[in-house]
Amino acid sequence: MSDNTHNEKQYVTDQFRQLLDLFNKDQSVLLSHEGELSKEEISKLEGNVENIVSSLNIAKGPLKKIFFISVETLQNMLIHGHKNNEGHQANFFILSKNGVKINITSANLVSNNAIPALQKQIEVINSFDDEKALKAYYLEHLENNQLSDKGGAGLGFITIGMKSGNKLKTEFKKINDDYSMFLLTSTVSLE
């Protein structure tokens, strides 16, 4: 294992701990996961999200949005998050409640070379103030895009933006010359 890989994993772990401490001061952390993801782990987390969110006695509409966004986020992390030479990922997922909002926060490693395209994609999604216009963009994107080498058509962020009804919040924290931590927060209003 290279020093860079160890540093990447340690950096993500440290950021996870700091964010949990911060969230625990002004929010309720409902669920958190840091470390490897697999199809089995995602299935377990999906069940936990469903149980926790269902126990909050919130309306069916926001409940479905929270579950959908959580599943999409976890799957995106598994499929698109950077893997080191041994196939290991460094990532985390936090589901938190802040007043009348649920925040779905995720982090995974991305290549520094991929950041400009990711930033542009998020900026375009966030530029839509009209739900119908974003849906039209989604349909246009669906018709005109081919599958990537990882099996996606670049629709994950668009669907998350559509479901949340709020702007996506992102942050890229440079770790080294090769990789950064990509932090994504989606918010669902409970009112």
Image (cartoon, helix red, strand yellow):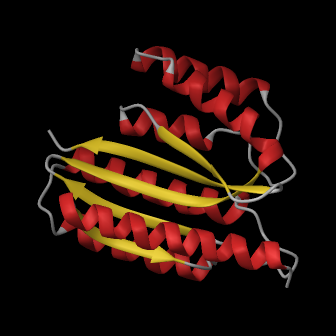
- Relative to the observer, which residue lies in front, 77 or 63? 77
Residue occupying the point 54% across, 81% down: 41
Determine whether 124 is above or below 43 in the image: above
Q: Quadrant of the N terminus?
A: bottom right
- Relative to the observer, which residue lies in front, 9 or 188? 9
Let me know if residue 107 appears in the view. yes
Quadrant of the image occupied by residue 26: bottom left
Q: How many marks?
A: 0
Quadrant of the image occupied by residue 94: bottom left
Coordinates of residue 99 in the picture (x, y in percent): 14, 50
Determine whether 62 is above or below 8 in the image: above
Residue occupying the point 59% across, 22% down: 124
Q: Is residue 108 left or right of residue 101?
A: right
Determine whether 70 is above or below 129 in the image: below
Residue occupying the point 27% across, 69% down: 30
- Relative to the observer, which residue lies in front, 72 or 111? 111
Let me know if residue 89 appears in the view. no
Coordinates of residue 57 in the picture (x, y in percent): 11, 60
Q: Is residue 146 left or right of residue 169?
A: right
Q: Is residue 77 left or right of residue 99?
A: right
Coordinates of residue 101 in the picture (x, y in percent): 22, 47
Coordinates of residue 141 in the picture (x, y in percent): 69, 26
Quadrant of the image occupied by residue 78: bottom right
